[in-house]
Amino acid sequence: MDLGLLYPTRGCGEDDFAELCRRLDPAIGLGFAYPEWGAPADEPDPAAAVREIGSPARLTRAADRFPATPDVVSWACSSCSFTRGLDGAREQAAALAAHLGVPASSTSLAYLAALERLAAGRVALASVYHPDLTALFAAFLVEAGVETVHAVSADAGSDRALAAWGPERIVELAEAADHGEAQVVLVPETALHTTPLLAELEARLGKPVLTATAVTVWDALDRLGEEPVQDGLGTLFRGAAGRRRPSSSAS
């Protein structure tokens, strides 16, 4: 099966996605395409640039750059999907599904699917973003009936800066975000290299930890009816009784 990922910044976290796919099944094909940035990423409104790159028109143009049509496609960016709200994230996925004729999703929609699978409605956010972007993610979750009980915002800067974060810094962020009322801790950033840390994060916090890379890959494969199961990659990949059947490829 071939997984196509639209990814916001070339040369950041693609190798983390590749590592996760190799650990799940070396036969998974993985391809990337890159939408074009519009407004400068450092303009005063921190959400403006990520909203613009996530326009359905930009995403469908980028999808034409895949060498071949993948079996499933996902917009592998947290902020570029949740800043448009739940309806906007669904619109992105619907546009990609209609354009390519395959199931489509995004990292933000993948978070909702993973939380539904885990029957979790209260989360803590280990956010690398500016507090304004963190608040937009919490608002996105509220639209889907998910409560954020605690959040931290690292305000860490660019994708390239985040791709250089070491394991200790990622673990520290997750531990700072954890809260006793949270059923799950979310780490929403696809530039972070989290695959080697999936088991360690859950062991330290004693609860599921959902990273952006993990939910994106899990959701994409699950939408093909291929629920990925593998030991050593955290709760989400241990499998579950019953398979979620999405009402549509863009749900």
Image (cartoon, helix red, strand yellow):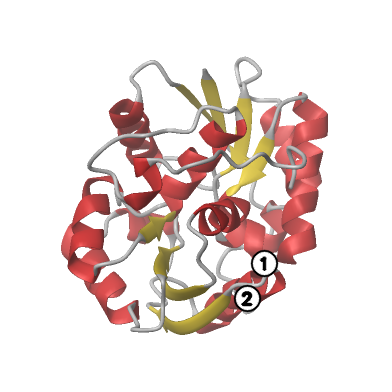
Q: Is residue 106 left or right of residue 51?
A: left
Numbered tag placed on residue 83 in the rendering: 1
* Residue drawn at point x = 43 percent, y = 76 percent: 124
Residue 171: x %, y % from top left: 22, 66
The amino acid on which the numbered mark 2 sits, given as a three-letter code, is Leu
Q: Quadrant of residue 135?
A: bottom right
Are the two marked residues, 1 and 2, in contact with CB atoms closer than 8 angstroms? yes
Crowd tier of the residue under label 2, counting other residues whose Cα lies within 10 Å: few below 14, some 14–19, many 20 or above:
some
Residue 19: x %, y % from top left: 30, 34
Residue receiving disc 2: 136
Numbered tag placed on residue 244 in the rendering: none
* Residue drawn at point x = 31 percent, y = 66 percent: 207
Q: Is residue 43 left or right of residue 88?
A: left
Crowd tier of the residue under label 1, counting other residues whose Cα lies within 10 Å: few below 14, some 14–19, many 20 or above:
many
Sequence order check, earlier mark of 1 and 2: 1
Q: CA distance from mark 1 to mark 2?
A: 6 Å
